[in-house]
Image: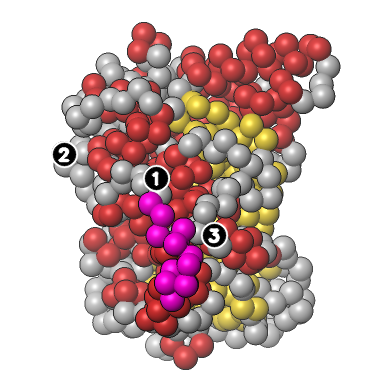
Amino acid sequence: MRETRSPSQVLFSHLPAQTTDIKSRIWKVQSWLNPLTLRVDTDGVRQRLLSAIDPWRAQGNDTGLASQLHQGKTVEVVGVNPEQGVKVDAWPNVWRCQSCRRVTSFKGQCVCGNKTWAQLHFVGFHECGYLGEPFIPKCPEHNQALVKHSSSSSVRDLEFVCPICHRALQQGLGAGRPCPGCKQPGLTFNVHRAASVYSPHTFTMVNPARPEHLQALLADGGREKSLRWLMSEMQTARPEKLAPTRQSMIDSFVQQGLPLAAAEAAVQAAIDAGAGHLDKPVDVLDISPLRREEAEATALEVALATYEGRRTASQLPGDPVGANLRAIYEDKYVPAIHRAGLVDVDHVDRFPILRGVFGYTRGGKPVGESRLVAYQGRQQSIRVYADTNETEALYLRLDPVRVAAWLYRRGLLKVAPTDPTKARIAIVNAAEFPGRGDDVPVQTAGSAVLSLLHTYAHRFIRQLAVLAGVDRESLAEYLVPHHLGVFIYATPRGQFVLGGLQSVFETDLDRLLDLQVDAETRCPLDPGCDRSTGACLACLHIGEPSCSHYNKFLDRKTLFGSNGYLRKELS
């Protein structure tokens, strides 16, 4: 049997060990047949994986995956092979006669004469990863079983009896028994498509569609030039070339495959031969070595994400548009941007994103509390099932001077620079960003900035969904907290029509930003929500594939509390 699904549908609903409905029957995915190896930045994937699994690592439920990644275990990223697809088997092999409700493990003609069967759609599972068919005992005398009709959807209300002598055989499906896989108690039964049966876990990363873009950026200064570009408010279309230095030349030679010692010797020989400019001092950004590596890496991500071009909202008045639209750009866009606490908003029409699924959990517990089951690939490698796409995005850039002042008022920054570059440097030096699985009992500069940016992004997604009239799960976030930025992008699997973000950017950005500031700030569940975490499903939460931090580090008070970032009297 062959069925056609899009790559996005396969990625999220046809994963190994997952069950799915096809043509009114239940199937279990065995494997992706000869999946295609995707061209990715493997070092970047490794770092993103370590970040994504942090909640499980923090609670000891990552089954050693973090340790394996640190030890350098091979990571392979694969996509579905469109020619061969996915192998599925009919499962579970437990059938119910649609006439008399007898239950059996084979199909054919029922004792009652009927030949129409339906699968019993309940499965047994355990948080160790086990998935199995429910066991239905047969009458010891007549070797038959029947499930009595029940209007309840609860597994506990299922009643199995003998259709001949009416002997009671079993109530429910035996929940709580030891798991046949790990022998531990806690076996559970539920409908096969319930979220508690199989919860895939994902990560996203910027992945250049063309490797030459990464190579071009890494040349002539590499990560450093990307960092300088970000610190200077992205004034050029791309990071400009920097004059070569001793270190940039060494890095270039190493990237070409030369051993480090040989690269250093070659550069020194060039200096001795007259290339003294390589030792010329450069304007050094006053960023501590502890923070510089992450700041450079994330700056490179932004440069890659915008490599194909971007349009900046504050520059729209220079576009060849009509007088009415130009008046809106000049009179409404710029004030709305500043009022919303932003330096600017960029539209990126070719945002290169990789979405990967690295494992799954069973049991329906909060992220990190169940055992993570990672996928295995060839030769016991760590496997990530993924797809790559180019979509459109808006890049929101928070005002560094305003963020520095906000941190200063909270006692989290010693000074509040009024120069944008100095403000960015001060924030980078002060902010140690928590991992996704970290609990932060005492707020730090890093946790405050992350909460501010994350809360801002979730509120923006919700307001954008209302304004555009789409499901907010069609939108997703990509946070760049080191540089006070966030990409809001249209998910390829969602219902958001490509070009929708461009339309909002060109005609309704002022309205959207006004909503960000002026729309209702209270939660329907206040005062409970406000007294708890300040964020819940009713006010800020969005689905896991759309949220990169599992709905942690969210609090409406960061925006609208007594010292809130968007409080009008503080704007």
Q: Please, what secondary structure does the residue beneath circle 3 have?
A: loop
**Residue type, mark 2 in image:** Val
Question: In the image shown, does 131 or 322 lie closer to the viewer?
Answer: 322
Q: The magenta stretch spans which residues?
A: 269-281
What percent of the width, then of the height, locates residue 382? 44, 78
How far apart, in angstroms, are the residues tagged by discs 1 and 2?
A: 36 Å
**Residue type, mark 3 in image:** Asp
Q: From the image, tell me which residue sits under label 2.
A: 442
Above or below: residue 569 compared with residue 528: above
Check contact, mark 2 vs mark 3: CB within 8 A.
no
Q: From the image, tell me which residue sits under label 1.
A: 283
Q: From the image, tell me which residue sits under label 3.
A: 220
The quarter in which the N terminus is drawn is bottom right
Above or below: residue 539 compared with residue 138: above
Q: Please, what secondary structure does the residue beneath circle 2 have?
A: loop
The quarter in which the C terminus is drawn is top left
